[in-house]
Image (spheres, rainbow, N blue to C red):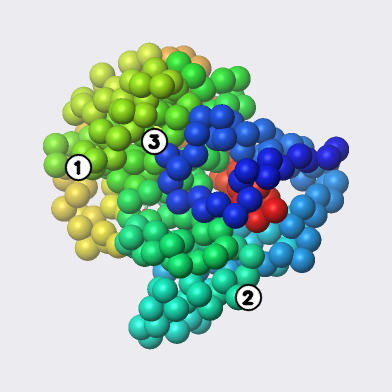
Amino acid sequence: MQVKLNPSFKGRDFIAISDYTTEEIFEIFDVARQLKKLQHERIPHHLLAGKTLGMIFQKPSTRTRVSFETGIYYLGGYGLFLSPSDLQMGRGETIKDTALTLSRYLDGIMIRTFDHEEVLELAHYASIPVINGLTDLMHPCQVMGDLLTALEYKGGLSGLKCAYIGDGNNMCHSLLEGGARVGMHVTVACPPGFEPEESILSRARQEAQATGARLEVIEDPWAAVAEADLIYTDVWASMGQEKDAAEKEKHFARYQVNSKLVAAARPDVIVMHCLPAKRGREITDEVMDGRHSVVFDEAENRLHAQKAIMALLMQ
Ligand code: CP
Ligand code: NVA
């Protein structure tokens, strides 16, 4: 099987879902599905033979690190894991100088960091594609894996109803952007004070006009899950918020995805979580391990979605 890569992707960054059109998002899914088949059949697909990806991690990671590192390997390339203690950036070298230097060695950079602006700055100065592996504001690669999973389970995305239960965080932001692009309705249920950022919501709503996706933010998790095809949740305290975890838990007690809440959705609802999960907090064991859960399919699909993104951008 010959995987065709549209040259219009070449050299671009992948920082936010909203940087890509609806057609482009589906084109990425199409490549991801082809690569998944090749991978499962163990057919070599060295689309990035001899190419290198630098992976900057300022926060911990299991899925993102392993899926990018194995992903570039399966594509015939090589990945370098770069922690803050490996890079001079950890000692104050500027992002600009790091970008200009790394662009001389590598064919692409994946970065996970705190401040979203740092990723934008890195991409501005780098002459090679920069891929966002999570910031405090967004987690677009995760949502690509999630939407690919929903597509596989539901056969389509337009018109699906997704209930996002919990913190209006980076996951929630990217999910709103993803919903807007693919025509999936997203109802966020969160406690007052923990809503997604207004600027992201209003821009996503504007973009949703093209696909008909309805994006809303409410308080009541029960109202959110009514008729839901997908229930999505994430940790209540994200990386970097560990000191607020105990305080936050008080606000989120009503927002646990448990069997009772799942039973209030459609009978064929799929339950999603980006992982890592705090079992017994935002999601119960019973749901994580239950028949509606697709959380490990999402984890696997990170690999295939990101391989597609790398192959397209770094071709
Ligand atoms: N979902 C996700 O990004 O997981 P990691 O933090 O393990 O990379
Ligand atoms: N919201 C979580 C997502 C982890 C993949 C965090 O930022 O820690």
For numbered disc 3, what is the local secondary structure?
A: helix
- In the image, which disc is placed on residue 105? 2
Check disc 3 and report the residue beneath it. Answer: 177
| 152 over 145 or under it: above or below | above
| Residue 92: quarter of image | bottom left
Q: Where is residue 33 in the image (x, y as percent from the top left)?
A: 69, 35
For numbered disc 1, what is the local secondary structure?
A: loop
Closer mark to the observer between disc 1 and disc 3: 3
Q: In this view, does 203 lie to the left or right of 6?
A: left
The span from disc 3 to disc 2 (Cα, nearest Å) is 33 Å
Q: Which amino acid does label 2 sit on?
A: Tyr
| 306 over 216 or under it: above or below | below
Ligand 2 within 8 A of label 1's CB? no
Q: Is residue 230 left or right of residue 81?
A: left
Q: Write the residue at 43% across / 20% down.
A: 211
Residue 247 in view in this figure: yes
| Residue 282: quarter of image | top left
Q: How many numbered marks does the figure carry? A: 3
Residue 83 in view in this figure: no
Q: Write the residue at 60% across / 55% down.
A: 11
Q: Is residue 81 left or right of residue 242?
A: right
